[in-house]
Image (cartoon, rainbow, N blue to C red):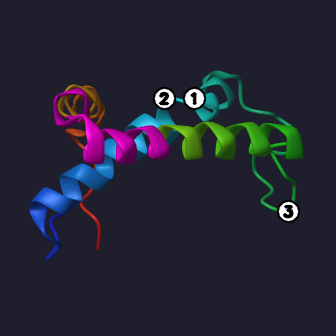
């Protein structure tokens, strides 16, 4: 795991939020599929449709909103959510 000069508490929270908002959302369904043999090696080709991207962003916004709402209104629920997010981020690089 790469270390940085970032605030370690804030870095961990950022990684947990990203895990909850992105990794465990619709993008995981796309990631779980097989690699496209035609376009996977060529970055000139989009590998995510507009509809898929819209779904990914909508899910991420909804999750981040939920986490921010919990931070302001239900700290116990936030703590439980972040524990779940932490399970996925143990080997992630810290922010730079």
Is residue 47 positioned above or below 7 on the image? Answer: above
Return the residue at label 1: 28
Residue 12 percent coordinates (x, y)? 20, 51
Q: Is residue 16 visible?
A: yes
Q: What whole-number distance in Å separates the C-alpha atoms at marks 2 and 1?
A: 6 Å
Give the prevailing secondary structure in the magenta stretch: helix
Left or right: where 40 falls relative to 70: right
Disc 2 packing (10 Å; few <14; some 14–19; many ≥20): some
**Where's the C terminus, which quadrant?**
bottom left
Left or right: where 18 falls relative to 80: right
Return the residue at label 2: 24
Residue visible at 48% across and 29% down in the picture: 24
Is residue 80 positioned above or below 12 on the image? Answer: above
Which span is picked out in magenta? 64-78
**Outermost residue toward the front?**
73
Q: What whole-number distance in Å separates the C-alpha atoms at marks 3 and 1?
A: 22 Å
Q: Look at the numbered disc 2 and give the secondary structure of its residue.
A: loop
In the image, is residue 73 part of the stretch drawn in magenta? yes
In the image, is residue 10 part of the stretch drawn in magenta? no
Q: Look at the numbered disc 1 and give the secondary structure of its residue.
A: helix
Residue visible at 24% across and 51% down in the picture: 13
Return the residue at label 3: 44
Question: Which of the 4 image quadrants contains residue 38?
Answer: top right
- Lower position in the chain sequence, tag 3 or tag 2: 2
Residue 63 percent coordinates (x, y)? 49, 38
The answer to whether the residues at label 2 and label 1 have Cβ atoms under 8 Å apart is yes
- Lower position in the chain sequence, tag 3 or tag 1: 1
Q: Look at the numbered disc 3 and give the secondary structure of its residue.
A: loop
């Amino acid at each position: 795991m790469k270390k940085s000069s970032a605030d370690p508490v804030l870095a961990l929270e950022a990684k947990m939020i990203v895990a909850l908002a992105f990794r465990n959302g619709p993008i995981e369904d796309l990631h779980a599929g097989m690699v496209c043999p035609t376009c996977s090696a060529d970055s000139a080709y989009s590998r995510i449709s507009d509809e898929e991207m819209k779904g990914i962003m909508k899910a991420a916004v909804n999750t981040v909103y939920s986490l921010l709402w919990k931070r302001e209104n239900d700290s116990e629920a936030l703590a439980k959510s972040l524990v779940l997010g932490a399970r996925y981020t143990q080997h992630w690089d810290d922010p730079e």
